[in-house]
Amino acid sequence: MARRAHSRSESYVEGFSRNGSWVSGHYRSGTSVSASNKLSEKQVAENIRRIHEYYTPVVYKTNCFWCEEKVFFYRSEDGGCALFDRLGTPWDLHRCWEIHKQEIKRAVANELYRSNFNGRVYYKERQRASKPIKSDSISMVGFVDRQPMEKIRLPSCRGSTTGMFRTINFVPEDKIDVYYSVLVPSTIAEAFPNYSMHQVDCIFRKYKNRWYCLLTKYRRMSASGKSDQVANAGVILDGNCSVCGILLTDRHWGFGSDFGSECSSCGKMRGTRTSDEFAQFIRGCYKQQRKRIS
């Protein structure tokens, strides 16, 4: 634990035991105890947590990282930061920060040049990632790569206007050379603009020997690390049809207009009906069935 600097005044100390030996009572002269810079692991973890969780403005005096002159570090509540010679208007940036900022810009410019950046559009070639070998689900933080959204309709959504999906290329932040082709319900596709950051949970399901990666829930992230609440607005997929309860097979599953799991037979009956219309249709079928039985 870090020790704070303090002073000890002259005083009489009663006898006490130290490391198995008895120390007789004695007078203690005034002394100064210097501070210790060594933090415990708990203190370090707590400081890291504060840095990541609290986005209030932070300012303190420190030494420049490069020239070691006395400067002020300032971070605004949106996460932007810099070193300043003086605080307040006109907010004089420390010269080292300006110099190294230009170095960073040059490094970025060189990388974009090597990637054939034309001044307007940047696109990096990435390989499509396949389903994890030992799991049918994946959770990741990353961003939506720039690409036109492709429309796709899974089989039991035939004829439905609300059961459409859009594909997004999702790039994990810890492996930016690959992307996952994720199916997103068309009703929430606008929540995934190009280069937007998200935390997503996805599930893999197979149809006709092809694996599909389907969004189940997501959380929008900001550049500073803040995040929205988890939105359970993706697909609802389990092993059975949500309408008739039949076990779904690799060839006979899809989604209704509410993006709940649905077998192909129920999909045919649904046609262009909305969820409410289909529920009313099913209730009518049950009534007719009960009449025939009675």
Image (tube, grey):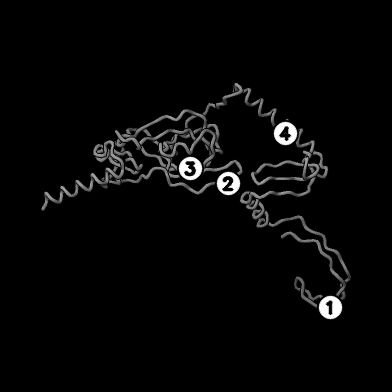
Q: In which quarter of the image is the N terminus?
A: bottom right
**Given the image, on which type of amino acid does mark 4 rest?**
Lys
Q: What amino acid is found at the position of numbered circle 2 in the picture? A: Lys
Q: What element carries label 1?
A: loop
Q: Which residue lies furthest to the front in this view?
A: 89
In this rendering, the label closer to the viewer, 2 or 3: 2
Image-based side of 63 in relation to 292, left or right: right
Bin the neighbour count of mark 3 within 10 Å (Cα to Cα): few under 14, some 14-19, many 20 and up. Answer: many
The residue wearing badge 3 is 200
Labels 3, 1: front one: 3
Which residue has dot 2 on it? 226
- In this view, the mark in front (1 or 4): 4
Instruction: State the image quarter where residue 184 is shown.
Output: top left
* Amino acid at the residue labelled 1: Gly
Q: Distance between the residues labelled 4 and 3?
A: 33 Å
Q: Which of marks 3 and 1 is nearer the N terminus?
A: 1
Secondary structure of the residue carrying numbered label 4 = helix
